[in-house]
Structures are given as C-alpha cells and as structure tokens.
Image (tube, rainbow, N blue to C red):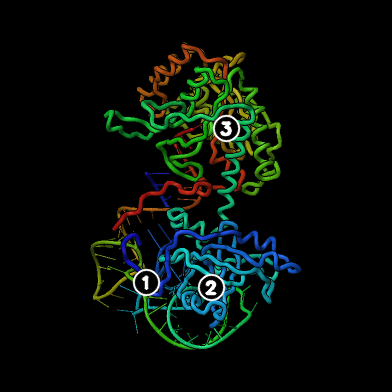
Amino acid sequence: MLENTKNDQEMRRIEELELLEKAGVQPFPYNFDKIHTCKFIIDNFSDDNPEILSEVAIAGRISSIRRMGKASFCHINDETGKLQIYIKRDDLPDFYEHFKMLDIGDIIGVKGYAFRTKTGEVSVHTRQMQLLCKSLAILPIPKEEIDENGNKIIHDAFEDKELRYRRRYLDLIVNSQIKEVFIKRAKIISNMRKYFDDKGWLEVETPILQPLYGGASARPFITHHNALDVDQYLRIALELYLKRLIVGGFEGVYEIGKVFRNEGMDKKHNPEFSLMEIYVAYKDYFWMMEMVEDLYSHLALSVCNTTDIEFDGKVINLQKPFRRAKMFDLYKEYTGYDLKGRTNAELIDIAHKLKVEIEPGTTNMKILDEIFGSFVEPNLIQPTFVMDYPIEMSPLAKIHRSDEGLVERFELFINGAEMANAFSELNDSRDQRARLEEQARNRAAGDEEAMVVDEDFLYALEVGMPPTSGLGIGIDRLVMLLTGQTSIRDVLFFPQMKPEISR
RNA sequence: GAUCCAGUAGCUCAGGGGUAGAGCAUUUGACUUUUAAUCAAAGGGUCGUAGGUUCAAAUCCUACCUGGAUCACCA
C-alpha cells in the first residue's frame, strides 16, 4: 500500500484523470468561489420562497453517486455536512460526459439553485459544475440509510482502528461524526484560554528543548543539538520555567503545550500529550481549589451546556463546589486503616492484610501509592480534591502549614482518574535544594524517574519567588471527560503508533 | 513487559487440510427526481511476514510484525 502497487480501481482513476485532461478538464484548478455551505442551504431553504437560494455556489467531496442514464444524483460533503446535488445531461451537455468519469472522493464545485426533490430532500440543481480535485485513492466510504424513524444506519462502517489512527484524514472524511470530538477539544482549550485571559493572566511560551528536564517524575526523550554538540531533553513538564517567570515579576502566567514522557502507551497515556500549567502569585492551594472547581464548572457549561456529564455509563456532576478530602482520611475511609506516620514494617503488614502485593524493600511511598491506587482511586468517581500528600511524593510543593510530614498539595480525581495537580509552591530555596538533593540520591540509587538538580532553578528561588500557587491540568483527559471518550487516542488527531514496516 | 484475541478483495466480514467466497465498492450495458437507487453482466486476492509439517496449508505448528483488550509499569 505504501509502495506503488495500484489495484484495478486505482489504475482506472489514473486513466480517468488522463482522459479528463485530454478532454480539456483541469483536474487540479487553483480556486473556486465557494459562497455557501451545505448546512446553510439546508437550514435556509424555504418551500415558500425557493428563490432566496436561486444562486448558490457550494463545493465539497463527493460521497455517493446515483446515476440514472441522462441524469444523476450525488451527495457532496463540506465541513458543515452533506448536501444532495442533481445534475441533468440536458442542462450541461458537455460536462455531463465528464461527470461520468467522476468518482466518490473527487472534490467538485457546483453552482445552481436549491430545490426540494420529490422525496423531500433539499438539493441543489446544477447549472454549472467544476472538478476541483481528482481523487486517485479509494475511500472506504460506507453506505448510509435513514430508517423509518429517521435514524441513520451506517452499513459496513470503516472501523479498523489501526487504519483510522494511521490515516486520520480518511477517518475524518468517512466517519465525519468524530469531528465533533475535535471541535469540542478546540472549544475546551479556547474557553480555558479565555477564562485565564479574562483574569489578566499572561499566556507564555517556554522552551521545549531543555538542557535539563524537571517538574515531574518521568523519563525524558533525549535529542542532540548538533551546533552546540550537546544532548538536550524534550520537556516533561512546564513547571520550572513558569516559576522562573514568577520570580521575574509576572504575577500570573500560564502555558498550554505539549510535553513528552518516555513511557508506555495505553488508553490513558500517549508519549506526547497536552498540559496546561498556571502559576498565580500570592495565592495558596486553597485559593487554587476554588479556581479549579470554577473553571471545570465553567468549561462544562460552555462546552456541554450542562454540568452533568455522562461518561462511561456514569453521570459526573461538575457543579461546584467539589468534595474536599485529606489523603489520609481517604485511606481511613476506604481501607479502615490509619496509615499516617507508619513505619515501613507496619505499612507492609497492612498491605498484606489488604492483599496488596508488595515486594520486599518497597519504599513507604510506593506502598502508599499502591494502596491508594487499589482502594481509594476507584471510589473517586465524582470530582474530589485529594489534599495533603506526604512530603516525599511531592518535591516541589511547600510543607504543610500545620500538618507535619505533609505538603500543601491537591490532586483532582474524577471517575477514578487524576485530572489536575496543584500545590502551594515551595519557595524556600534551602528546602527546595534539600529536596532535589534527596531526589538526586534516589536517582543514584536507581530511580530513573527521580528529578535532577537544576542549579539555575535553585538560583531563581534564591533570588526569591513570592508565595505562589501552581496548577497542572492534563488537557487530553479533560477532553476525554467532556467528550465521553474512553481512549486518549480518540481525542488526539494523530496518536503515537509504531511505525509500519516498509517492505 | 505479560496474557488473550485479531489480521482473507478498496470497506465490512464468512470460510478452518483438497480449484479463494458474499454484500457494498469498481467496470460494461439499460434507466432524465434517485437516495443502502434498481436491473443485467464482468473484473478484482502472494489469505499480515518468514519458516516448518504434509502428496496438498488461508486452514495445523513455530517465530516475528501490526492492532485491540486486560494486567503490570507510569502522573
């Protein structure tokens, strides 16, 4: 398929293209004066006043053809939907011969007048037709039927997931309903941006290629800069550079962009994904919780027109305020054990009692994480702020003002999945240095995801960062929630795929 | 990374040791309001790749590739 092996249908299209050219048809013209959309014509056609659409100019891709000798019907699709075209030989004696050589997939421009057919479908009667692009590949367009209840039945839909992801352009043409997901995605992002802009916070761009990576626990992608002859990393988070900008005097900055983590892929993870991070000076994580619940309610209303979101057979209520619960209270609630301040031996014992498999030598953090994932997370269906994490889990968060051993951090869980992560940001450079050095020791001990020490970031903190609250939101997971998609691949135009072997 | 399932015509699928099938799509012919258009005829395949077993493999075996699901890892 990648090679130049054409099947009979493709060969025939090339022949037709050449025949059309010989007949003087330009198969790839430069422009077309497209005035109307398919949807506009359907929405605005009036049986009482058909003359208001007596001069229309539309264009789109042919999605079906019904030829009846000296007259034909076809449907074309543009960005807004599909519309039926009627073409009669007597109207266009010359072009009708060319029309016979057009195929499903070709893009045409049509000028004519709107009318309603005998069977009731608003259509355009062709006065003039122009080929705008000859398609040489065969589209897997399915047949569609409208049953007596007006429901659309699609026959033999193109649903091979591998091909749909690898050739998303085909998927978009043929399964056009998926466009709704991506349109919503764009709306979510633009509404989020507007929400922040309206508050006066500044959208910024920070480096994607970085000499050091940081801001999250993850393995990076490594690349090489030839001119400088140095290895560089693709960013795994936005945090450290955005904090530098708060140090620099901006009081509210945010960035929406791709980050890259060199890890496995599954329904919830893609190696590159979109992250939003925002930092607001003089605020703490309590303030941030209010901002987050307001943002989520606002986005649900503006994108879905409701705060009751149907997802995976459940109804998620994004009406603010969200539940707030301290992490160790949740442990108590869902396991019956108080896990705070436990020794390693005690935690291992409890893990065994809970039938959580723990390998010998597992750290407290791993055990806590494990129990949280098995016993707490699956219960956090409705939006829940999980507050106050152990300090070891959060090297960039500020120590809790009253609870020893904890930091002021919350994560927002919805439908058992982490949706957002926020702190009162650590701005004591001495503490930050100590925590990064602890990370470095973990790293030396074999933890490949531990953070590296970024001296320049530490210097920035020494210069001084005001009290600040920061937040990260995984855009893809938010889009999944608001569009009802259960796989991250269905909210990405081009999800990561293994390369096809070229033969 | 582990396990299971899948890969056959452009699409959706059947077939499961003995000549490769269907519907749609395509081609030819008929048809000037059809809409899963209809009617008649025709063409189209290295059965994911590579080995093996066998007189004979799409079919059985092994390995590999790609995808999906579940689990593990992972914010």
Where residue A54 sits: x, y (%)? Answer: 66, 67
Where residue A233 sits: x, y (%)? Answer: 37, 31
Position of B32 relative to A394 (above/below):
below
Q: Are marks 3 and 1 on the same chain?
A: yes
What's the CA distance linking mark 3 and mark 1?
56 Å
Determine which residue is flagged by label 1.
A18
The amino acid on which the numbered mark 1 sits, given as a three-letter code, is: Glu
Where residue B33 sits: x, y (%)? Answer: 63, 80
The amino acid on which the numbered mark 3 sits, given as a three-letter code, is: Ala
Q: Chain of mark 2?
A: A
Position of A297 relative to A470 (above/below):
below
User: Of the residues tagged 2 and 1, which is closer to the observer?
Assistant: 1
Q: Quadrant of residue A458?
A: top left
Whether residue A308 sits left or right of residue A434 in the image: it is right
Mark 3 residue element: strand
User: Residue at horizontal 48%, vertical 59%?
Assistant: A31
Q: Which quarter of the figure is the N terminus of chain A placed in?
A: bottom left
Q: Mark 3 or 1 closer to N-term? A: 1
Determine which residue is flagged by label 2.
A65
Count of number-bearing discs: 3
Position of A46 relative to A320 (above/below):
below
Q: Mark 3 or 2 closer to N-term? A: 2
Q: Chain of mark 1?
A: A
Query: Which one is nearer the viewer's eye here, A126 or A494?
Result: A126
Determine which residue is flagged by label 3.
A420
Where residue A407 sits: x, y (%)? Answer: 56, 19
